[in-house]
Amino acid sequence: MLECENPGRNHHLLAGRIAERRLVFRLLLFALLVTPVLAAVWYVPWFVTIDGPAHTYNAYILKELLKPVSHLAQFYGVRSLLLPNVAGHLVLLGLMSIVSAQMADRIMMVLTFVGFASSVIWLRRKVRGEQ
């Protein structure tokens, strides 16, 4: 009969595989749960949030004001970029320089939803621990 040289090592490898499978299962479960929301955002032709268009328009105004010559400068001005809500507008501004405003709005909705759902899972793990 063959004896294992280090039985503790085998237990450690088994525990690592179980943890890896749990992680894969949790990621698949997370993907399954967020898929309906993501499908609604991407497949409904004119999916609109309550304030999404206002944020998109604010990002457009900010984008125009950051240009050297802007026709909006006579109506608006940038006082400070250090406001909490401006971070979202700056992300939208960056996205709108790459894709259309509607696509940027959808990407922002996805980032916001997935970020919020991930933060809820993170908070649960911090409060209850790994189980």
Image (cartoon, rainbow, N blue to C red):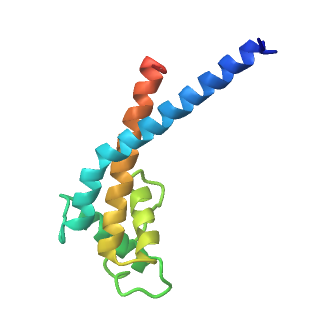
Which quarter of the figure is the N terminus placed in? top right
Residue 76 in view of the camera: no
Q: Quadrant of residue 18?
A: top right
Q: Is residue 36 left or right of residue 73?
A: left
Q: Is residue 2 above or below residue 38?
A: above
Residue visible at 19% across and 71% down in the picture: 45
Q: Position of residue 49 (x, y in %)?
A: 20, 59
Could you tell me how many numbered marks the image carries?
0
Residue 91 coordinates in the image, percent (x, y): 44, 63
User: Residue 53's x, y, as percent?
Assistant: 24, 67
Task: State the quadrant of the C terminus.
Answer: top left
| Residue drawn where x is 39% and y is 63% of the image | 89
Q: Is residue 33 visible?
A: yes
Q: Nearer the viewer, residue 80 or 26?
A: 26
Q: Locate residue 54 relative to residue 25 in the image: left or right.
A: left
Question: At x 37% / y 46%, what residue is drawn?
Answer: 31
